[in-house]
Image: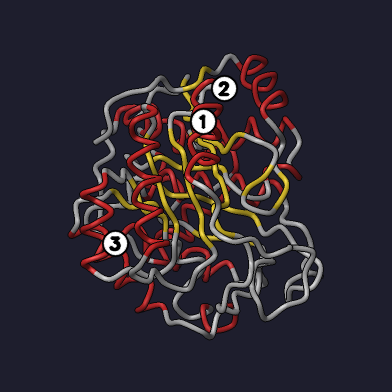
Amino acid sequence: MSTTLIRGVQDVDFAIRHDWTVDELAEIHALPFPDLLYRAQTVHRQFHDPGKVQLCTLLSIKTGACPEDCAYCPQSAHYDTPVTPEKLIDLDKVLTAAQAARASGSTRFCMGAAWREVREGAQFDQVLDMVRGVREVGLEACCTLGMLTQEQADRLAEAGLTAYNHNLDTSPEYYSHIITTRTYEDRLRTLRHVRRAGITVCCGGIIGMGELLEDRMALLAALSTQEPHPESVPINALVPVEGTPLAEQPPVDPIEMVRMIATARIALPASIVRLSAGRAALSEEAQALCFLAGANSIFAGEKLLTTPNPGEDHDQRLLTKLGLKPLDLHPSP
């Protein structure tokens, strides 16, 4: 099978497919490492500039006290974690952070609120003002606010929202082991609302939560059978946090992270693949392999919502060392 998968790879135009199966993805994931990276890099070069990486900044605009029971999340009200709940922050603080993000090279500014779902009222109106303000700063604006109705998605689109993040997290089969307060279909419904509103979709998952390889491939199948594919696909490695049910999970093997990114790149050729949570635990060499495997976006700054991140100085040094450049600001799709 591996011969079929890589034969003549340098001469093949890789088409975007929406019919990937779990078995096909598992065979790609299992290729010899050089073959896997070669195929992923070949696909990457067909659809993207291999010398550019998009920098994004993620800000928690409302922290903690979330009613969901996501087993990985220190912001859940179900667990006793080091996170201190904070109310929705002021618009001025968001705009100051957005201006700083643009000055440091970020082109997308992401705002996360620890809500189960968006509720109409003053707080949602304030988020809409945040979206408008971030766009006026000249950045792409992304939000992750929990579940949305179609009307709420439409209002976000009217405010100028570029993208909405709503991760599937894992496979449909493993999902109930991680979250019981909402269903996989709840997640998919919100994604449909986002797509119908004309907002681009940011949707990925987490590895290292005790799932099987089949679950990882089923997650990629769920993403790659969407039409169109999510424009942005974050690949996260679990960051175990004291007090959560997954606090004792072992670290994700860096090579497994690279394999996951490479397989995602092949299955989702035109998507931005974001090397997201867990990056702080990766060596520079492992991060370089992730870029080689097709990752072309990272989150800049010291934190990803409430978990550690390498920091801007580290990222600038690493990108310089690798000869990679931040993606320039460009008109949003």
Q: Nearer the viewer, residue 4 or 329?
A: 329
Q: Position of residue 210 (x, y in %)?
A: 67, 72
Please name the amino acid that badge 2 sits on. Answer: Ser
Mark 2 Cα-neighbour bin, 10 Å: few <14, some 14–19, many ≥20: some
Q: Position of residue 151 (x, y in %)?
A: 21, 66
Query: Which mark, by number, is residue 104?
Result: 2
Q: Secondary structure at mark 3?
A: loop
Locate the N terminus by quadrant.
Answer: bottom left
Residue at image mark 3: 225
Judged by depth in the image, the label closer to the viewer, 3 or 2, is 2
Q: Closer to the observer: label 2 or label 1?
A: 2
Query: Do callouts 2 and 1 mark residues in contact (Cβ within 8 Å)?
Result: yes
- Residue 55, which numbered label? 1
Counting residues from the start of the chain, the first of labels 1 and 3 encountered is 1
The image quadrant of residue 67 is bottom right
Left or right: residue 295 versus residue 166 is right
Q: Position of residue 315 (x, y in %)?
A: 66, 26
Direction from residue 96 to residue 272 in the image, left or right: left
Label 2 vs label 1: CA separation?
9 Å
The kind of residue tagged 3 is: Thr
**Rendered image quadrant of residue 80:** bottom right
The figure's colour scheme reads: secondary structure
Instruction: Residue at 67%, 44% (x, y): give it.
Output: 303
Q: CA distance from mark 3 to mark 2?
A: 36 Å
Question: What kind of element bears circle 2?
Answer: loop
